[in-house]
Amino acid sequence: MAQAAAVAKPPAPPRRRRASATPRRLPYLLIAPAALLMLGFIAYPVLSVFYYSLRDYNPTKPWRNGFAGLDNFTRIFTEDPLFRDTLVFSAKWVFVEVGLQLMFGLALALIVNQTFAGRALGRALVFSPWAVSGVLTSAIWVLLYNSQTGITRYLADMGVGEYGVSWLSDTSTVFPAAIVADLWRGVPFFAILILADLQSVSKDLYEAAEVDGASRFKQFWHITLPHLKDAIILSTLLRAVWEFNNVDLLYTLTGGGPAGSTTTLPLYIANTSVDAHDFGYASALTTVAFVILLFCSMVYLRLSKFGGEK
C-alpha cells in the first residue's frame, strides 16, 4: 500500500523562474535616446524664451542688457498699441481662414469621396497644393498678383478694372488677396483629414437611412457630421494654431503691409527680433502668444467636448 501511494503521488510542479524586467524595459531604453534628443530640441528653446522674456537683451546695445523683471510684460499691455492691433488682426485672420478652409475642405472631401471616372487624378490635384511650401506659395501668388503680368493685367484687357492696379498694395484689397492665397494651400489639409475619416463611415448607416426615407441633407446632418466631429475639432484646432503662427506667407506676400494692415502677432515678433534686434521684448511677446494659444486651445477642446460621445 505504501508503495502504491508513493507511485500515485504526482510530481511536484517546477518552480517558476522570476520574469526578468529587462524585456519590459527594452522598448523604453531603445526610444530613450531619441526622446531625450527631441526633449532637448523642444525644451531648450522654450526655456530660453522664458528666460530672455525677463531680460533686456539687444546684441547691438550690450550696455543695456540685464535683468528686466516684468518690465517687458508691462510694456506689452500698457505701452504698445501695436501688440493690440496685431493680436486683433491675428484673431481675424485665424477666424476667417480656418472657417473658409473648413467649409471648402469639407465640400472637396465630400466630392472626391464619391465614385467617378478619374477620381484618383482628381484627388491628386486637390491634395497637391498642400505639398507646396509656404514661401513657394507666396512666390506663385506674388506673380499672379503682379500688376504688369498677373491677374489684374488680364482683367484690364477684358475691360474689368484698370491697368497697373496692385491688390497687395491697396489696404482695401490686400486682406482678401492674402486670404485667397492661403486658402489655395490650406484647403487640402482639411480635405485630406476629412476624407480619411469619411472612408470609415459604414455604408449600412446610409442604406438604413434611405430605407427610412431620409433625404441626402438629413443623412449628412445626422450621420456624416456626427461621425466627423472629432476630425473637424482636431483639424480646426491644428490649423488655427498654424494660421496664428503664420509668418512665411504673409512675410513674403505683403511683408505685413501696406501700412501694417496685414501684420500678425508672430510677424510682429519676427520683425521685433530680426529687424530691431530686441530679443528680450520679442521673447516676452512670444511668451504672451504662447499663453494665449494654450488658453484658447484648452477652452476650445473643453467647449467642443473633443473625444466625447458623437
Image: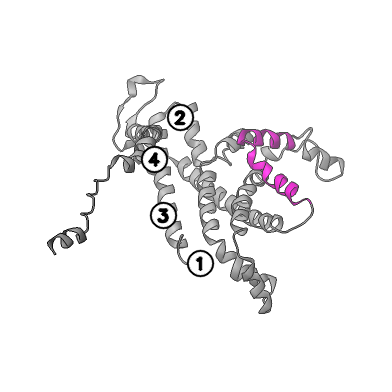
Instruction: Give the SS element for disc 3.
Output: helix
Across and down, in percent, residue 36 comes to 36, 34
Picture quarter containing residue 165?
top right
Q: Nearer the viewer, mark 4 or mark 3?
A: 3
Q: Residue at x 60, y 54 (%)?
A: 196
Above or below for 305 versus 91: below
| Residues at marks 4 and 3 touching, judged by CB atoms closer than 8 Å | no
Mark 1 and mark 4: Cα distance apart in space: 35 Å
Identify the magenta region. Answer: 118-144
Q: What amino acid is at disc 3?
A: Met
Q: Nearer the viewer, mark 2 or mark 1?
A: 1
Label for residue 112? Answer: none
Instruction: Give the SS element for disc 1.
Output: loop
Q: What amino acid is at disc 1?
A: Lys
Q: Is residue 90 magenta?
A: no
Label for residue 310? Answer: 1
Sequence order check: which comes first, mark 2 or mark 1? 2
User: Does the rendering let one see residue 174?
Assistant: no
Residue tagged by mark 2? 273
Q: Nearer the viewer, mark 2 or mark 4?
A: 4
Q: Nearer the viewer, mark 2 or mark 3?
A: 3
Of residues 41 and 203, the one nearer the viewer is: 203
User: Does the rendering let one see residue 137?
Assistant: yes
| Residues at marks 1 and 4 touching, judged by CB atoms closer than 8 Å | no
Residue tagged by mark 3? 298
Q: Residue at x 58, y 57 (%)?
A: 197
